[in-house]
Amino acid sequence: MNSLSIFAGLDADGVIRFVGDVPRGAECGCRCVACGSPLVAKQGDVRRWYFAHEASQERPDCFAGAVNLLRRIAIERLQQRVFPTLPVYRATVSTRPPLPQLQETVTWQAGEGRVEMWEPRFLQHAPVGLLRLSSGTAVRLYVEVDSVSTANLRPAPSHEGMLLVNVPLPPGAEALKDLSSAVQHIDAAATLEWIRLPDANSKISEVSEQVKERAKRLQHERAQFAARPTQWTDMPPPPQGSPSPPAEEVDESPWAAWRKPRSAFVHYGLRDGSAWVMFTHGDGRHVMAPWPSPGEGWDEELPARLGEPDLQLGVYVLKDQTQAMIYLGQMRPKVRSASNWAELVSIGPAA
Ligand SMILES: [Zn+2]
């Protein structure tokens, strides 16, 4: 939760009104966009200007309603201006076990983007418009306020790119006291980030092959090193006294940066040789990854009721872990659990 209160509502004409743009009190006839209650403008100390609900209880989604109005302002702002310069696309490619883990960042200059179409309605988490790159590729444009995960965005077809304009909520109410402050905040704080750019796919697969080749050479060198005769100088003296401490978990998984440390992996080996691995995000969400590597179209393999693919994390974020277990259970998988990455790798491909 943040410290913000309701900063905007709709007046009788359906116009978005910020608390600092209306007279104090109920004179503007503004209503809460979520619950329809009349709003009262409270204007004391400017750091705490807000709309209160007149004689009724504010519900949790009332604030979300105001946030949605801010999203509309952000979309209008994009419509009014020359579209901002597109950011450089970045993707990380890494090798998978049993190869040693190497990784490399691929960058791609997206070039110019031109708005071809705006959607007639701006639905929650849906694209608001279509950009056309100079390469001819279509890119769906998403605008979100304070987006923490791309898992809930409605995915675009795989041949199209996905670009997110994210507007963070400001730390204090002053930046949202009136329309001009809100627009200033949007202009200064909004960021553009690529979720997907198909133009970069061929470079990504080229770099993946190069990294894989390097990893194979490294693996070969390690094998030769291990095969040479043992020399006394390689052997440290045996420790005296206390037994060695338990080994720290070494997580070389592609999810190491955000997986909940020391949480278990559950491996569902399916009859067609593919598998899913279920585990826990550091923020407590249950996720499921295609195993051992994501195949083409992995993000369309599960029914939407189970969860949403997060293309950045490369996993499905599960809505309900039990439902996902039931769904997989119907496929009669071979279920194995692993307490760490090394154990998971040792399960190997599903037999
Ligand atoms: Zn309300």
Image (tube, rainbow, N blue to C red):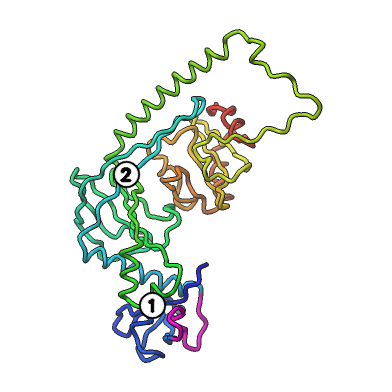
Q: What element carries label 1?
A: loop
Q: Mark 1 points at which residue?
A: 177
Identified at 65% across, 35% down, the residue is: 248
199 left or right, relative to 260: left
Q: Mark 2 points at which residue?
A: 89
Q: What element carries label 2?
A: strand
Question: Quadrant location of residue 126?
Answer: bottom left
Q: Which amino acid does label 1 sit on?
A: Lys
Q: What span is in magenta? A: 44-59
Q: Is residue 65 visible?
A: yes
Q: Which amino acid does label 2 sit on?
A: Tyr
**Which class describes the residues within 10 Å of circle 2: few (<14), some (14-19), or many (20+)?**
some
Identified at 25% across, 65% down, the residue is: 120
251 left or right, relative to 136: right
122 left or right, relative to 227: left
Q: Can you say whether 60 is above or below 274 in the image?
A: below
Which of the pair 183/157 is nearer the observer? 183
Question: Quadrant location of residue 7?
Answer: bottom left
Question: Quadrant location of residue 50?
Answer: bottom left
Q: Can residue 337 be seen in this view?
A: no
- Mark 2: C-beta under 8 Å from nearest atom of ligand 1: no
Which of the pair 237/66 is nearer the observer? 237
322 left or right, relative to 315: right
Residue 68 spot, x, y in % from top left: 38, 69
Which of the pair 21/156 is nearer the observer? 21
Q: Does the magenta stretch include residue 71?
A: no
| Marks 1 and 2, the one that precedes in the sequence | 2
Mark 1, mark 2: which one is toward the viewer? 1
Which of the pair 15/6 is nearer the observer? 6
